Image: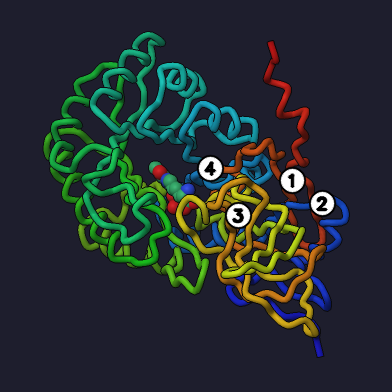
Amino acid sequence: MSDTSMLPGHPHIARHGTTLQVEGVALDALVREHGTPLFVYSKQWMLDALAAYQRGFAGRDALICYAMKANSSLGVLRVFAEAGCGFDIVSGGELARVLAAGAEPAKVIFSGVGKTRTEMRQALAAGIGCFNVESEAELDVLNEVALEQNRRAPVSVRINPNVDPKTHPYISTGLKGNKFGVAHDRALAVYRHAASLAGLQVVGIDCHIGSQITESSPYLDALDRILDLVQAIEAAGVPLHHIDFGGGLGIDYDGDTPPAADALWKQLFERLDARGFGDRRILIEPGRSLVGNAGLCVTEVLYTKPGEEKNFCIVDAAMNDLPRPAMYQAFHRIVPVAERPSLPATRYDVVGPVCESGDWLGRDRDLAVEAGDLLAVLSAGAYCMSMASNYNTRARAAEVLVSGATSTLIRRRETVDDQLRTEQAL
Ligand code: LLP
């Protein structure tokens, strides 16, 4: 009989004997080599997630632009660049990063409400594929910057379709009250204006309605509203080469059941075909769904601390490493790396060393652990390392990419010297 068992919902994480493994690599061995907290990613999970989108797009004219804000580590970017992906960027920093990772500039699209002139110049000079413009004022500035350089900037206008993605309010972006995009009923006027500017070349239309979306219906509603606009804008004489449908597909954190990417796109293409847009070039900007469940963070239990109302399990990872619980009350599963069948489980709040009550990673978790044990915080591939900070002068964690039986350190642990290098005491 095999002593291997896969973690439910995590096909590349399994218990082998006394330790958890990511693909063919044991976590306890990685920790002996690299210490904790340690992010570990499965390359195969990323490629499988990408393959689901690729199946959905088979036979279609489509480009998958990985939204690199989800995880912008060079080693992760390289995986998607080698797989032929484009990238969705939101800053000059991300542009520099993705070019360093070997991305093709023509496959890069630039989103975000606050692009600076400097960032626009950099992106134009690099020859990116499209600027996703979010306001009329930004159109005018981009036009000026492009004319200065004797170029025409390829643009899409991000439309706010005013649909409810039914997700956490901090990560819904397509509602009227959000700062993102141009209102649906202003769209035609904004496109007419864009088409009149000599420094711009209108190439597409864009929308993104939110993140961690676990139902198909908000996407179908948004698609209908965008296609209505495509018809109206093209009838006004402005051709749209592509439709960028954003990202936002959710992952399973806690028994969530988002549609599979291929199943979602089957539905969306049925709608596109029915409305005569099945041949149109489609761009998407998925982030979380390409990396979220590829990653986990291994942390060591420093102390267990019984309390009057609560017991605390104090670990060496904190809100600076894993900010999602503190920011969005997000749930991440936490499992021991080695199980202790003889120890009774205790109900703990799993907390970090940062001096804030908001520094918790999981609440009311039943765990059989002692100081020195390792815990794995799951679903930590997206919006963890990319949102990590140095709060409390904590060094950011190391990251390892696993492929089969091979592990590669893709980011060494930060040192205090790294942090002090940019500062000066007068
Ligand atoms: N495109 C645009 C314009 C976006 O604003 C985003 C995410 C994406 C694509 C990628 O969305 P995804 O496929 O990853 O859902 N920090 C939050 C999530 C913020 C998402 C921001 N925008 C979290 O940890 O839940």
What residue is at 13 percent from the left and 41 percent from the top? 185
Mark 1, Cα crowd under 10 Å, few <14 / some 14-19 / many 20+, is many
* Nearer-N-terminus badge (4/1): 4
Q: Is mark 3 within 8 Å of ligand 1?
A: no
What residue is at 30 percent from the left and 26 percent from the top? 201
Give the spatial CA distance, label 4 vs label 1. Answer: 18 Å
* Nearer-N-terminus badge (2/3): 2
Contact, mark 2 vs mark 1 (Cβ under 8 Å): yes
Q: Secondary structure at mark 3?
A: loop
Residue 175 locus on image (x, y percent): 25, 49
Q: Is mark 2 within 8 Å of ligand 1?
A: no
Q: State left or right for residue 231 relative to residue 289.
A: left
Give the number of callouts: 4
Residue at numbered disc 3: 381
Can you say whether 285 is above or below 3 in the image?
Answer: above
Q: Quarter of the image holding residue 220?
A: bottom left
Residue at numbered disc 4: 68
Q: Is mark 4 within 8 Å of ligand 1?
A: no
Give the spatial CA distance, label 2 vs label 3. Answer: 18 Å
* Nearer-N-terminus badge (4/3): 4
